[in-house]
Amino acid sequence: MDPDLILIFSFVLVIVLVVLTFGSIAGKRDRMHKLQRLELEARIAEAKAGTAAKEAGDYRKLEERVRVLERIATDGDHALAAQIEELRALDATENVRTPEAAR
């Protein structure tokens, strides 16, 4: 074989190996980057879901309090003190449930 042909073939072979190596490294880095991005998006979604659940719980608590206050304001048959005690009992019950939910 001609020495120039062997030199050209080995040069092309080296170029192909360098390109394939670089492509493999770049592809691996790209997959790692996509995986990290998906993990961060999952964490963000979990945080948003936790915030939404907390806000929904706060909303229910507020709605229940407003209902009791509406009953106090519109019902003339019941004693106001009994209604206030009911509110206090409701608040005490909610305060007891809150630490358990945090666990």
Image (tube, rainbow, N blue to C red):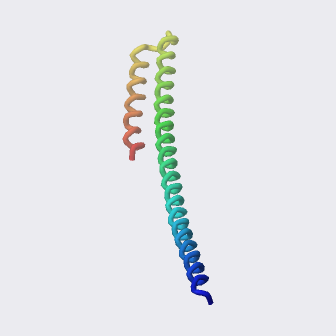
User: So how many labels did they put on this image?
Assistant: 0
**Residue nearest the viewer, comparing 101 with 76:** 101
Above or below: residue 85 compared with residue 58 = above
Q: Is residue 63 above or below residue 33?
A: above
* Residue at 43% in and 14% down: 79
Q: Nearer the viewer, residue 5 or 49?
A: 5
Residue 29: % across, % down:
49, 61
User: In the rendered view, does 58 fall on the left or right side of 95?
Assistant: right
Residue 25 percent location from the top left of the image: 50, 66
Q: Residue at 51% of width from left, 33% of height from top?
A: 56
Residue depicted at 51% across the width and 44% down the height: 45
Residue 92 image position (x, y, % from top left)? 37, 31
Displayed quadrant of residue 83 = top left
Residue 88 in which image quadrant: top left
Q: In the displayed image of the protein, which residue is found farthest to the bottom?
A: 1
- State the image coordinates of residue 71 (x, y, percent, origin top left): 51, 16
Where does the N terminus fall, quadrant-wise? bottom right
Residue depicted at x 51% and y 47%: 41
Q: In the visual, does 49 lie left or right of 9?
A: left
Vertical relation: 10 (above or below) 84: below
Q: Is residue 96 above or below residue 9?
A: above
Q: Nearer the viewer, residue 41 or 8?
A: 8
